[in-house]
Image (cartoon, rainbow, N blue to C red):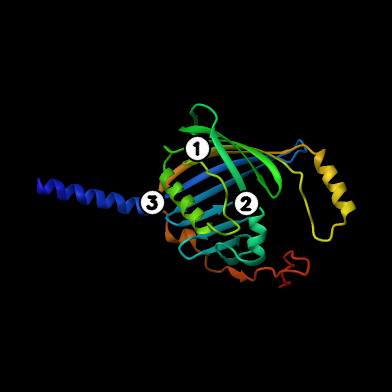
């Protein structure tokens, strides 16, 4: 009996150790219609392990390290990167907080299957930068790495709590297997605009069709990721963050 108990304890210890170091890789495809009738499709990969996340697109890579409280924005084509604290401070915090939103989700339909995994449908609505948008999503708690995905999202939410980046509302648990969003852009401001210019842009936006986007998960893999995944590669040059200009907007970075 003691041997069985000891073996069980060892198994649970190994399982816990493995879970703490497990990683998840989510491949997504996003299609966007800016209201012009023409669509653009792009691929995105999200990698999460512990308190680290890396997002990879065609042009950029972004690493968020919650343990270090840092964010790294990389341009692989030019082999340069920016480094900033997370949560951000100063002008960058103001800019990013404007992109945060309030969301309210409710179950909207029965479970369905996306990329081979069952997910629960939800509908949400909210605002972002003064613009209204709606979201229909399908979230899976059964997909590989769903717990690791949720654990990181909650850790990030705790990290930004009490800051301008704090998101209001509750996002459903699980990996968003599909997100269909519609955004009606009605608010746009730029430093130095006259009231007449602002009125003309507002009228133009009022007559413009909404921006529609659809993001679908194409593959999910649960595996241990190497530490090098979440660090800036050797050979990259660090650049300074743009300084705040006299209008409050980030000023252009000095030419190299």
- Horizontal and vertical percent position of residue 170: 53, 44
**How far, Cα to Cα, is label 2 from label 3?**
29 Å
Q: Secondary structure at mark 1?
A: strand
Q: Residue 169 appears in which quarter of the rendering?
A: top right
Residue extending furthest toward the front:
162
**How far, Cα to Cα, is label 1 from label 3?**
20 Å
Of 220 and 152, the residue lying toward us: 152
- Residue at image position (29%, 49%) is 15
Quadrant for the C terminus, please.
bottom right
Q: Quick one: label 2 or label 1, which is nearer the N terminus?
A: 2
Q: Secondary structure at mark 2?
A: loop
- Above/below status of 114 relative to 24: above
**How far, Cα to Cα, is label 2 from label 1?**
20 Å
Marks 3 and 2: in contact by CB < 8 Å?
no
- Residue at image position (50%, 64%) is 69
Quadrant for the N terminus, please.
top left
Residue hosting label 2: 100
- Above/below status of 74 relative to 2: below
Of 34 and 38, the residue lying toward us: 34
- Horizontal and vertical percent position of residue 128: 67, 47
> How many neighbours does mark 2 have within 10 angstroms: few (below 14), some (14-19), or many (20 or more)?
some
Task: Please give the count of numbered marks on the rendered protein.
Answer: 3
Q: Is residue 205 left or right of residue 219?
A: right
- Residue at image position (50%, 63%) is 231
Of 148 and 238, the residue lying toward us: 148
> Which label sits on residue 139?
1
- Residue at image position (65%, 68%) is 241
Q: Quick one: label 1 or label 3, which is nearer the N terminus?
A: 3
> Which label sits on residue 22?
3
Q: Secondary structure at mark 3?
A: loop
Of 200 and 168, the residue lying toward us: 168
Q: Quick one: label 2 or label 3, which is nearer the N terminus?
A: 3
């Amino acid at each position: 009996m003691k041997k069985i108990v000891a073996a069980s304890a060892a198994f649970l210890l190994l399982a816990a150790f493995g879970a703490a170091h497990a990683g998840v890789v989510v491949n997504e495809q996003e299609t966007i219609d800016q209201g012009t009738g023409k669509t653009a499709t792009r691929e995105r990969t999200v990698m999460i392990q512990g308190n680290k996340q890396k997002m990879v697109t065609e042009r950029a890579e972004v690493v968020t390290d919650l343990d270090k409280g840092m964010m790294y924005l990389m341009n692989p084509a030019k082999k340069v990167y920016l480094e900033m604290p997370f949560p951000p401070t100063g002008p960058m915090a103001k800019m990013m907080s404007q992109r945060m939103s309030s969301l309210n989700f409710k179950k909207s339909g029965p479970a369905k299957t996306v990329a081979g995994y069952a997910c629960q449908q939800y509908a949400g609505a909210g605002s972002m930068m003064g613009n209204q948008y709606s979201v229909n999503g399908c979230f899976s708690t059964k997909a590989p790495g769903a717990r690791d995905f949720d654990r990181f999202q909650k850790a990030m939410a705790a990290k930004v709590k009490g800051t301008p980046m704090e998101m209001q509302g509750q996002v459903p648990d699980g990996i968003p297997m599909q997100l269909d969003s519609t955004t009606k852009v009605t608010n746009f401001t730029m430093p130095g605009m006259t009231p007449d210019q602002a009125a003309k842009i507002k009228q133009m936006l009022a007559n413009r069709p909404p921006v529609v986007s659809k993001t679908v998960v194409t593959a999910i893999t649960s595996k241990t990721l190497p530490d090098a995944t979440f660090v800036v590669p050797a050979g990259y040059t660090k650049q300074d963050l743009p300084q705040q200009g006299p209008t409050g907007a980030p000023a252009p970075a000095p030419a190299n």
